[in-house]
Amino acid sequence: MYQGEAYERSRGGFVAPRQWNMVDCVCGCANLFTMNEMRSVFENFNELADHDVQNSYLRGCTELVMHENFVNGRGRNIFRYKVRLPTRTTIVCQKFF
């Protein structure tokens, strides 16, 4: 199963392993967590069983706050993004999420 490791696509090509990166958002969301907490969230996510389980986890970390309707009949959803730790849940910006 793919859990963040490198793999070869069935149609050809190589996908590099996922790597943890520090996200630099203007909100300063990274200041809300220690390096160990951020790395732990990344590693725990990669250890989830498969892509469907990962998607389910991500859906559980997002919350629909509101839906805006525009005059032209189109609309958009506005979400709240949460990072869940064993001791707390913290709201972060979309870029950090």
Image: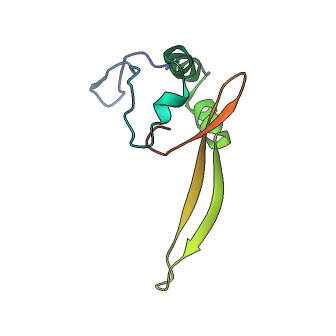
Q: How many marks?
A: 0
16 relative to 62 in the view: left or right: left
Relative image position of residue 72 (x, y in whole percent): 46, 85
59 relative to 42 in the view: left or right: right
The residue at the point 38 percent across, 24 percent down is 21
Q: Residue furthest bottom?
A: 71
Q: Is residue 83 above or below residue 79?
A: above
Q: Residue furthest right?
A: 87
Relative image position of residue 10 (x, y in whole percent): 36, 27
Q: Pick whichever, 50 or 97, lies toward us.
A: 97
16 relative to 92 in the view: left or right: left
Relative image position of residue 88 (x, y in whole percent): 71, 28
Q: Quadrant of residue 27?
A: top left
Relative image position of residue 5 (x, y in whole percent): 42, 15
Q: Pick whichever, 54 or 63, lies toward us.
A: 63
The residue at the point 32 percent across, 31 percent down is 11
Q: Is residue 1 above or below residue 95?
A: above
The residue at the point 55 percent across, 31 percent down is 51
Q: Quadrant of residue 49?
A: top right
Q: Is residue 52 above or below residue 42?
A: below
